[in-house]
Amino acid sequence: MGAPAPAGFTAREVPGGPVTEVRAPALLAYRWHPDGIVRWELGRGTGHGARLVLTQTGPRGFDTDTALESWYDRIEHLAARLLEN
């Protein structure tokens, strides 16, 4: 903990700060802003594969539209890579 978040868990507009919580292989959380956390949680799905829950909090007034677009692109890239295997 305290090391920078791995690049695979960051997004274009969301820098990787220090890791604050790890529970491999199901959870990774890191601080991306003094007032914000990114949290990746991987768990059981509903019979069609795993379920990914990604949560980002931030300072009052942070640009949620830009964050959503960045995460959408990141998750689409991840899904495409998983389908390659």
Image: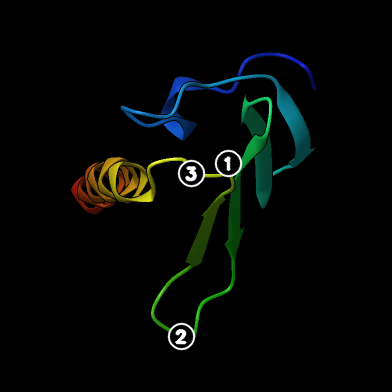
Ranked by sequence position, the earlier of labels 1 and 2 is 2
- State yes or no: discs 3 and 2 in contact (Cβ < 8 Å): no
From what the image shows, is residue 79 above or below residue 67? below
Say what secondary structure mark 2 lies in: loop
- State yes or no: discs 1 and 2 in contact (Cβ < 8 Å): no
Q: Amino acid at mark 2?
A: Gly
Report the label total.
3
Residue 5 coordinates in the image, percent (x, y) = 59, 23
Q: Nearer the viewer, residue 13 or 52?
A: 13
Ranked by sequence position, the earlier of labels 3 and 2 is 2
On residue 47, the disc is 2
Q: CA distance from mark 3 to mark 2?
A: 37 Å
Q: Quadrant of the N terminus?
A: top right
What residue is shown at x 48% (from left), y 44% (from top)? 61
From what the image shows, is residue 82 above or below residue 47? above
Which one is in front in this view, the residue at disc 3 or the one at disc 2? 3
Q: Amino acid at mark 1?
A: Gly
Which one is in front in this view, the residue at disc 1 or the one at disc 3? 3
What residue is shown at x 58% (from left), y 41% (from top)? 58
Write down the quadrant of residue 13 in the picture.
top left
What residue is shown at x 53% (from left), y 61% (from top)? 53
Q: Is residue 70 left or right of residue 55?
A: left
Q: Amino acid at mark 3?
A: Gly
Please give the residue where the numbered disc 1 appears in the rendered image.
58
Say what secondary structure mark 3 lies in: loop
Asked if one can make out residue 25 in the rendered structure from this viewpoint, the answer is: no
On residue 10, the disc is none
On residue 61, the disc is 3
